[in-house]
Image (cartoon, rainbow, N blue to C red):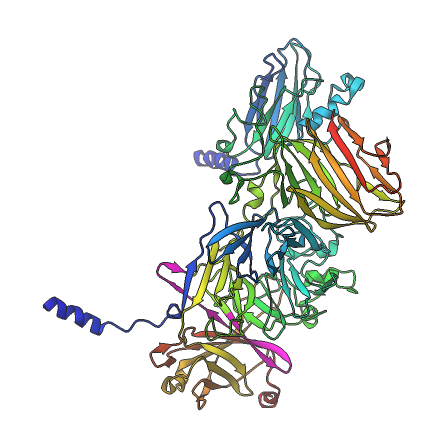
Amino acid sequence: MLLTLLTSLWFWVAPAPADTISDYYTIETIPTPPGLTVETGGLTFLPDGRLAACFHRGEVMLYNPKTKTWKLFAEGLHDPLGILAISNRELLVMQRPELTRLTDTDGDGVADTYETVADQFGMSGNYHEFAFGPVRDDKGNLYISLNTASNGAGIRAELRGQYDSLGRPGRMYACVPYRGWVMKITPDGKVKPYASGFRSPNGLGIDAQGRLLVTDNQGDWLGTSKLYNVEEGKFYGHPTSLVWRPGFPDIDPLTLSPQTLDSMRTVESIAFPHESMAHSPTQLVVDRSQGKFGPFAGQTFVGEMDFPHLLRVLPDMVDGQMQGACIPFFAKGGSGGTPLRIGNNRLAFAPDGSLWLGQTDHGWLGDRGIQRIRYTGGTPLDILAMTLTSTGFDLTFTQPVDEATARQLANYQLRSYYYEYHRAYGSPQKDVQTIPVTAAQLSPDRRTVSLTIAQLHPKRIYELHLTNLTAGPKKLMNPVICYTLNRLRPSAVGQTN
Amino acid sequence: MHTLLLLSGLLLTTSAWAQRDTTIIITTSGGLQFDQKRLVVKPNTRLHLRFLNKDDMAHNLVVTRPNARLRVVEFALALGDKGPAMHHVPAMDDVLAHTVSVEPGNTDSLTVNVADGAYPFVCTYPGHGAIMYGIIYATNEPGKLPDPNTDRNLPNPARVAEAGMHQHAEASGHPYSLTLPAVCRTFMADCGPAAIAVGLPGTDGGQSYVFDAGSCRLRYAWSGGFVDNTEQWDGKGQRFTTVVGDIYYRDTDGFPWRVGTQTPIVQFKGYRLIDRYPEFRYLVNGVEIRERIRPRAAGRGLIRTFTIAPTRQPLTFMATAQPGIQYRASTGRLQNNQVRLPAGTRQFSLTLSTL
């Protein structure tokens, strides 16, 4: 009797279950065949719903989620790091030496032709010359990206392609053609150098608006990791690839001053602060599930190698240019003994709206395997959009927020800083300032908070920490969001001057 | 003083680049054998080998580059009547060091720097090279060396010839067993960075070759096994896939085809698998050539079959002249290792074999 009383008392005083992301999404680990070293280089879904995956040791395997069985489709590829399904019998795979079309022409379930689609780029034999992609735009153009080489190793005695000693200096280098470039392959098979200035562009994607987005990794000339909106002919800041730009003078690009290079480059649309968001961003995928994956339909998700979270990017168009925010997704996610692992190198949405993750370490930090995140229902309290206004930022939430907490200025802490563009590896946060939030207004539908900021300056990152925001019993899933402010809203220019 | 000695001793043993000197005396044991067939030293050793010939006939001792024993033996054999004056040692890069001809009861010494890996040594006297050999392992991990009874680097006439068609899944490093023919694109030594290793079925480990997808040509071939990917697969993929077996053929010239008198411009187009054999497709000055390479039915060698798209231009195939290697052409006349194809030839085979 006493025991019963005590037990019920204990239940009564116990706090309500914590509201976590795992109340809305579950994660499971996909079993993989014995003997497979699951360093995942690519994931894609065939029209018939099967998963196609490629792995470090050159296998391409098909997984039927209904029967939970694996089958070998192709083998013998050189470190494939990207895959795109064309039909149930045809896949494009990006391996070190080329983009290859794998086709099962006789219908026996195994690829029998390995056709070279694009190999019009050089190889020095350096390990860091990875090749990524492809992604396809709505006109049928394909895009791939080519990693620069690393001075962690030299080059081989025999190269493929022309050697240019002007591209050899530096920590990451491009002594053979189109290292550090994004290449475009038109539907008629022409291979064109498309944009330059990349270091380690291990993530491509076409977003819901049809824009080509590419991630790049913190290192020399990248104070932090970032996302670019890539357009033809532009240079994105890592200098060595300039030696392969038509018309570029016969000089080592590293002899140009950082100021000159800065004036030539197109800056990132969204920076991923190294301390909180990403050490190594990976692939980009768009949620086209129309709600099957929860409240983020149409948004772009990004993988990450070192943190146990994914990211969402929230673009904001200002003066015709893309900039915007990034925020973690599924941070500390997982339950029942299955946490989200790190090493999330590849992402693919299944036809049922679940998000599949291909993991690898590839000699760096990471995990190995394949996991799948499924939406189980409900609406987590999270930020749907962050947009710049002439006086501050608007934050739009997935649902109405509680007025009392939303209007308290103490619940918003804002700091701003920038990362230096220079030859050294990475950058500390520079000129860190605490920025007062002077007003917080709630929209009539209580979904949007408009913050007034004491000072807004371009070319800075605004890192906002939100505390105590609630929607009834729900608490905010991700309290940190970072907005990359390249340009002010035109109407705000006058005010800040 | 005591501390200083201890410290300097520590430095000597821990520095990976410190070169060590090691002296080993090696003799003969009759029946065309060296008395020691497996020498194990640390990497980066300067090895002094003193060869004492206790046999009743003359021998030499030649240390070769890894996987190069067979080819050095072939080149030595091809010296013909020039052999004795050269101590039966061919002048080639694959020879790292050698003794002179050592008459019975005499000695001679050599010094060779071994970095890391497996360095064959062999007597290259005509007829001796096939059985009188051994191996120097420069390694920090002697525990990982193959069992001497199954070590393919050691002569063992009693070893049963195995059918090299399948490996167990766990040995293949894949979720399936390796089935020959097999294709493996990777980094390999003595090839451009877009290398394609192909393993072919056969007895005693089968044969393998490397095709260069950059320059669109066969680079070298070996017998006795396929490849070891252990180091290439590790980490970031910088290191080479290594050859398992003995290289018996190298194409040391440039691209073999000539279309008319044009300088060849090539473009790799991929391959298709026919009974698991890759048939490569490439363009030479716009003319499409398909090439399929199969092993000879018996004996060491390859049959290269070319299918040529219609062209009005005359085609010439130029084979690398190599001691110990002979060619046979299915059509046209082989002259100075060149074949000028009769006009309209659509299919052509070249058989490459060891003598």
Relative to B251, does residue A493 appear above or below in the rendering?
below
List x then y, in percent, for residue A417.
Answer: 53, 74
What range of the chain is rendered magenta? Answer: A312-339
Q: Is residue A331 left or right of residue A140?
A: left
Name the quarter where the N terminus of chain B is drawn.
top left
List x then y, in percent, for residue A238.
Answer: 65, 64
Name the quarter where the C terminus of chain B is drawn.
top right
Return the residue nearer the eye: A356 or A89. Answer: A89
Q: Residue at x 52, y 25 (%)?
A: B148
Return the residue nearer the eye: A66 or A145. Answer: A66
For the stretch drawn in magenta, the main secondary structure is strand
Name of the residue lying farthest toward the front:
A107
Relative to A185, does residue B108 appear above or below in the rendering?
above
Q: Is residue A321 magenta?
A: yes
List x then y, in percent, for residue B290.
Answer: 75, 45
Number of numbered discs present? 0
Q: Residue at x 55, y 55 (%)?
A: A53
> For residue A418, what is the image quadrant?
bottom right
Relative to B16, does residue A204 appear above or below in the rendering?
below
List x then y, in percent, for residue B228.
Answer: 58, 38
- Can see residue B244? yes
Relative to A105, does residue A257 appear above or below in the rendering?
below
Q: Is residue B187 magenta?
A: no
- Can see residue A433? no
Return the residue nearer the eye: A245 or B293. Answer: B293
Name of the residue lying farthest toward the left:
A1
Q: Residue at x 71, y 59 (%)?
A: A178
